Amino acid sequence: MAFSFRLQATSGRARAGRLETPHGSVETPIFMPVGTAGAVKGLTPRDLTEVGAQIVLANTYHLLLRPGDALVAELGGLHGFTGWQGPFLTDSGGYQVFSLSSLRRLTEEGAFFRSHLDGAAHTLSPERSMEVQMNLGADIAMAMDECPPYPAPHSAVEAATARTTRWARRSQAAQRRSDQALFGIVQGGVFLDLRERSARELVELGFPGYAVGGLSVGEPKQDLHRVLDHLDPILPPDKPRYLMGVGTPQDLLEGVARGVDMFDCVLPTRNARNGQLFTRRGKISIRNARYRTDPQPPDPDCSCYTCRTVSRAYLRHLHLAREITAATLMTLHNLAYYLDTLRLVRQSILLGRFEEFRGEMLRSLAVSAAEGL
Ligand SMILES: [Zn+2]
């Protein structure tokens, strides 16, 4: 089945839609758990289903280094290899090359780098990234982009943005799989003129979806919001928009309010492993001594497996004892919280009352933060 997107309702600029992919449909706005090396750390595919995940992100950089994309292809692509039968999205690998590897050289051809695992030399070009992503077989692939550092001068960001368009064209030309949708990535840093140019050039090339990259890299929140505000009327309304690597529950609400449909972030999963839980009453750190004898579930308003089954006291004990079950239980809860939040956001959009929902939720998160729970 081909890839398609249907916009179902809007409330203000917030959008509710439905993505169809070869491995099932995705109701947007959606949060995509990050399965770096082909697994969301601590969880099984059964857990992902239980928690309500609809689409999972896997990292091209990690998988191309280990176990290698050819092996994954031989074993049936990510779906055959991992057992997760729902939709997958893979990134291009470029971002991790810039952030994790020892980057040797960046040219128009691509990135020449050494693996952070064994120092082996690799090349990642737009063509190689597409080859790897076609081997991995995700439902959605991303065009390789150049993400400039923050802060960077206008001229440097302009050059990276122009290259991103050239690489997007090369990625399109290298695409061979008709069962895989390729998204372009808008770059341009915090400069609205460059963001606009990048978006217009990509729209001209024509992609089934558009991502906004290079944000949440240290810039002030107002810049993130300004960029999204500016891009909203430029990006085609009938195509999904994906804000990469963002963010907190508040960021998700602010993104949806500015027309974003898809999000991913390591925050709920990474924080869970560090003992931090997101709840409807704000964040809690399970290490805190106040939870030593606390019989309450992590989030009394949550119906996830973890909150139905265990207490804060037990989670605190498991976490301090470094039991791996602690990571599993807390990851389950944090993902349930993110996914439930966006499910409620979606309902509020379908009912035409997103602004009220957003206001109520932001107020309750702010009150909780002030109260320290
Ligand atoms: Zn829960």
Image (tube, grey):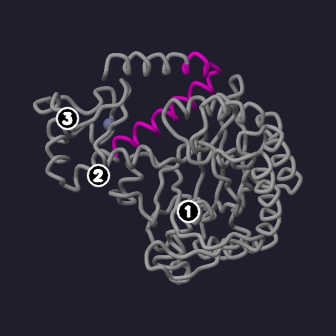
Does the magenta segment cover residue 341?
yes
Counting from the top left corner in percent of width and height, residue 347 is at: 56, 28
- The three-letter code of the residue at mark 1 reads Gln
Query: In the shown orientation, is residue 283 left or right of residue 188?
Result: left
Magenta-tinted stretch? 332-358
Residue bearing mark 2: 328
Mark 2 Cα-neighbour bin, 10 Å: few <14, some 14–19, many ≥20: many
Residue at the location (72% across, 53% down)?
Answer: 185
For marks 1 and 2, the one nearer the N-term is 1
What numbered label is drawn on residue 96? 1
**Which quarter of the picture shows residue 357?**
top right
Q: Name the mark nearer the viewer: 1 or 2.
A: 1
Q: Quadrant of the N terminus?
A: bottom right
Residue bearing mark 3: 312
Residue at the location (43% across, 22% down)?
Answer: 365
From where the camera sits, is residue 162 visible?
Answer: yes
Residue at the location (66% across, 72% down)?
Answer: 105
Query: In the shown orientation, is residue 110 left or right of residue 205?
Result: left
Asked if 51 appears above or below 372 in the picture, the reply is below
Dot 3 falls on a residue whose secondary structure is helix
Query: In the shown orientation, is residue 170 left or right of residue 68?
Result: right
Cα–Cα span, label 1 and label 3: 35 Å
Does the magenta segment cover residue 264?
no
Counting from the top left corner in percent of width and height, residue 345 is at: 55, 29
Counting from the top left corner in percent of width and height, residue 118 is at: 44, 79
